[in-house]
Image (cartoon, helix red, strand yellow):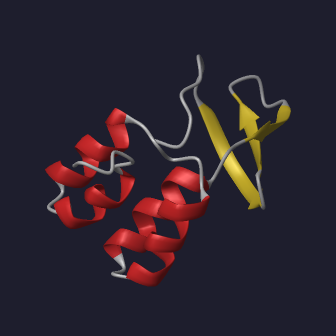
Amino acid sequence: IIRTIDLPIYITKIIGNQVFCLDRDCKTRVLEIDPTEYKFKLALVQRKYDEVLYMVRNAKLIGQSIIAYLQRKGYPEVALHFVKDEKT
């Protein structure tokens, strides 16, 4: 899931952060998306850990859901990079 929307769409093209699509009425639409989360997950699956750590340090991915995702998928060592508390 990249973004939740109310009605189904049919993707025709993606350029950068824009998704070009058709809705059920065959009207063209352009949706803006933030690709950060799916790029992060793709880098994990492809084992591109240098990209993963770069995104952990520089992207705005911090949140309980991303930490839970990392733990659930078997990447607890990556989840530790999100911890900001010096005592942890």
Question: Is residue 23 depicted above or below 11 in this figure?
Answer: above
Question: Is residue 22 depicted above or below 16 in this figure?
Answer: above
Q: Position of residue 67 (x, y in %)?
A: 30, 45
Taking the spot 76% from the left edge, 53% from the top edge, the residue there is 17
State the residue in front, 79 or 9: 79
Q: Position of residue 42 (x, y in %)?
A: 43, 67
Question: Is residue 54 depicted above or below 62 in this figure?
Answer: below
Q: Position of residue 11 (x, y in %)?
A: 66, 48
Does residue 68 appear left or right of residue 53 in this picture? Answer: left
Q: Quadrant of the N terminus?
A: top left
Q: In which quarter of the view is residue 29 placed? A: top right
Q: Position of residue 54 (x, y in %)?
A: 53, 72
Taking the spot 56% from the left edge, 35% from the top edge, the residue there is 3
Does residue 25 appear left or right of residue 7 in this picture? Answer: right
Taking the spot 29% from the left edge, 64% from the top edge, the residue there is 78
Does residue 68 appear left or right of residue 57 in this picture? Answer: left
How many callouts does the rendering have?
A: 0
Does residue 63 appear left or right of residue 22 in this picture? Answer: left
Question: Is residue 57 depicted above or below 70 in this figure?
Answer: below
Q: Residue furthest top?
A: 6
